Image (cartoon, rainbow, N blue to C red):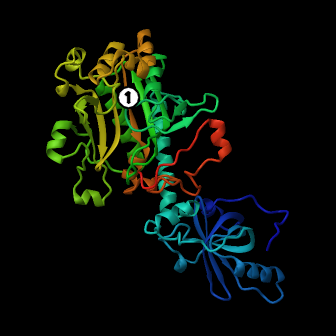
Amino acid sequence: MTSRTEGERSRVLIGELAQHAGETVSIAGWVDVRRDQGKLIFFDFRDRTGIVQGVVLPARTEDEAQIALMETAKEVRNEYVVQVEGIVNKRPEKNVQADKQNGDIELEIKNIEVLNPAETLPFDISTDTSGIDESVRLKYRYLDLRSERLQKNMRMRSEFIQKCREFLFSNDFTEIETPLFTESTPEGSRDFVVPSRLNPGKFYALPQSPQQYKQLLMTAGFERYFQTARALRDEDLRGDRGFEHTQIDLEMSFVQMEEVMEMVEAMITKTVESMGLTIKEKPFPRISYKDAMEKYGADKFDLRTEEEKAQGILAYAWVVNFPFFEKTDEGGWTFTHNPFSMPIPEHVEWLMKGEHIEDILTTQYDLVCNGYESGGGSIRAHRPEILEATYKVMGYTEEQTQASVGHMLEAFKYGTPPHGGIALGVERNLMNLTGESYLREVQAFPMTRGGQTAVMNAPKPLAEKQLKELGIEIVKKPEGQQ
């Protein structure tokens, strides 16, 4: 049947149908399952709130409307988008399905309108899709996302971010967005760069993190900042790392290391426990980098027993007292986390004098959970001479330091308060909350292992006209050269 009646009722969500027993209602959603038993046709319909069973009853010879309904029902297939009108009936006690949502009601279908038919899907979304070829899943990611597991993962991601945001607002943080176009710097991971049409031969960089901007916000006097930030890094891909990720990024002024860690620990505890998960130990254990490497062979580790793993327990811990510097392949020094960190108070003098470089510890603190690094932060350098000393240890001349972070040194001259913060990886945290092993299972549109975008065809060559506008010429490498 294809037309709606003038008196059609407004849509009722499937999850609310139990409140409408005995009433005629209209629902809209997808056909989850269709079962044709000849005289009776059963459907399971789903929307964002749940699933309900509906039935088309046998048509009497003289009942033209019911005959037309039965004909429509026989044409409808799985994943059709439909508008359905029917009576919400209580099911007989013997037919109640206690293990199913809405198992005690059934929709007696009076009208079906096909809003959009669906071709046969390229793979079955009614079961766990993790075993399906990755390239097929990502080509049809919008279908993969209909599966129960990914629906759950995406909604849990949303809930996690919402609860963290609510916690931060309740603790007087201000949400501020920072730019996506920024300056390329040689430190850290490789940048993704964007050519400038208005400034031929010059490039922007996409942010690896909002690190410098959030420190400048502390200079600006906001004291407590956060954002749900996108971070982009041209790193080698692996199961728990992609080109882009999201982080809950926060910074606080007039704090010491303990205060930042306590705030973050309180946020994580309140958030995950309100989501129904269990934390192994509170307060979170703390272990030095040295002890972690000696005991676990890595600075991220899993503190759970096998039984606790099976139960989905979350084992958080803090790793502290990281070395500030490490040797480069050329024999010089580079930072272990980022150059904007402060040494621990007793090692500030060593940094300023350039002494005992290998022994300087930093105020870096990493949050680990179930074998993954879930977040990392530090107390930051807030005085120009400390940042200058760090760059001097790394072999920068005064001119090179000015070229790299001169804007930060300038800002620090105008009353920047002591400050520190952290970035919590949303995907890494969601992997722990959901029990997933791959980052792509908690992102809506992830990339393939080869760096190909889901659904869309990128990266791909630019048109010659675009290259000319940007002043770019593509030089092909000789055959066989990597």
State the SS at label 1: strand
Residue drawn at x 45%, y 14% is 411
Q: Residue 441: which quarter of the image?
A: bottom left
**In the image, farthest residue toward the front:** 478
Residue 226: % across, % down? 47, 31
**In the image, farthest residue toward the left:** 294
Residue 180: % across, % down? 54, 34
Residue drawn at x 33%, y 56% is 312
Q: Which one is in front, 338 or 47?
A: 338
Amino acid under disc 1? Gly
Judge whether 197 appears above or below 25 on screen. above
Q: Identify the residue position indicated by label 1 in the image.
A: 421
Residue drawn at x 31%, y 49% is 314
Residue drawn at x 59%, y 50% is 461
Judge whether 142 appears above or below 228 on screen. below
Residue 217: % across, % down? 48, 21
393 sits to left or right of 465: left
Residue 304: % across, % down? 24, 53
Q: Which one is in front, 262 or 191?
A: 191
Res 306 visible: yes
421 sits to left or right of 454: left
60 sits to left or right of 431: right
Q: Quadrant of the N terminus?
A: bottom right
